[in-house]
Image (cartoon, grey):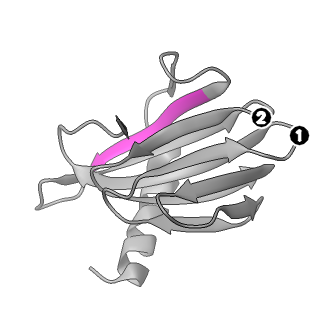
Amino acid sequence: MTISRLLAAAALVAGIASTTSPALADPSGPAGIGRTETVRHDLAGTSQEFVQVRVDFAPDAAFPLHAHPGIEIAYVIEGTVEYVFDGKPPVTLKAGDSVYIPAGTVHSARNVGGTSASELATYLVEKGKPIVELAH
């Protein structure tokens, strides 16, 4: 699947989010991090699904090193978020910026802006697998 087709599919999924049931926040995440799933939708004819999650970061909150079993596209809605990828220099994104994270890439994310920050994360993953796998 080409990147442009993947992004178009992600936009379609985002567009139908308003027709799904109310989002549920995940209270089991790291302190200062709120994760709210906005939509989960099968990719027809495959064993994959799209999952979209809003991630809210309190000031200085960080999501520890982790990976995803599929690709992630993260779009920063507000604030400033620093992403650290295993063995690479940090990448700092501000509202309106996005990042593509390949499947299995170990990374962390931290709010470095001094105010609240939010991102919209869209995942393409195998059905039935956990969305987040903490690195050991």
Furthest-top residue in this view: 27
Residue 5 appears left or right of 38: left
Residue that appears at 62% across and 66% down: 89
Q: List x then y, in percent, for residue 87.
A: 49, 63
Element type where label 1 sits in the image:
loop
- Tell me which amino acid carries mark 1: Gly
Residue that appears at 51% across and 56% down: 15
Q: Which residues are magenta?
A: 34-42
Q: Tell me if residue 126 is in the magenta stretch.
A: no
- Tell me which amino acid carries mark 2: Asp
Q: Which residue has dot 2 on it?
A: 60
Q: List x then y, in percent, for residue 106.
A: 41, 53
- Image quadrant where one finds the C terminus: top left
- Image quadrant where one finds the N terminus: bottom left
Q: CA distance from mark 2 to mark 1?
A: 7 Å
Q: List x then y, in percent, for residue 45.
A: 11, 62
Residue 71 appears left or right of 99: left
Residues packed near mark 2 inside 10 Å, few (<14), some (14 to 19) or many (20 plus): some
Q: Quadrant of residue 115?
A: top right
Residue 87 drawn above or below residue 122: below
Are circles 2 and 1 on residues that touch, CB within 8 Å? Answer: yes
Q: Nearer the viewer, residue 127 or 13?
A: 127
Q: Which residue has dot 1 on it?
A: 114
Q: Nearer the viewer, residue 6 or 63?
A: 63
Element type where label 2 sits in the image:
loop
Q: List x then y, in percent, for residue 62.
A: 64, 36
Residue 3 drawn above or below residue 32: below
Q: Tell me if residue 36 is in the magenta stretch.
A: yes
Residue that appears at 81% across and 49% down: 79
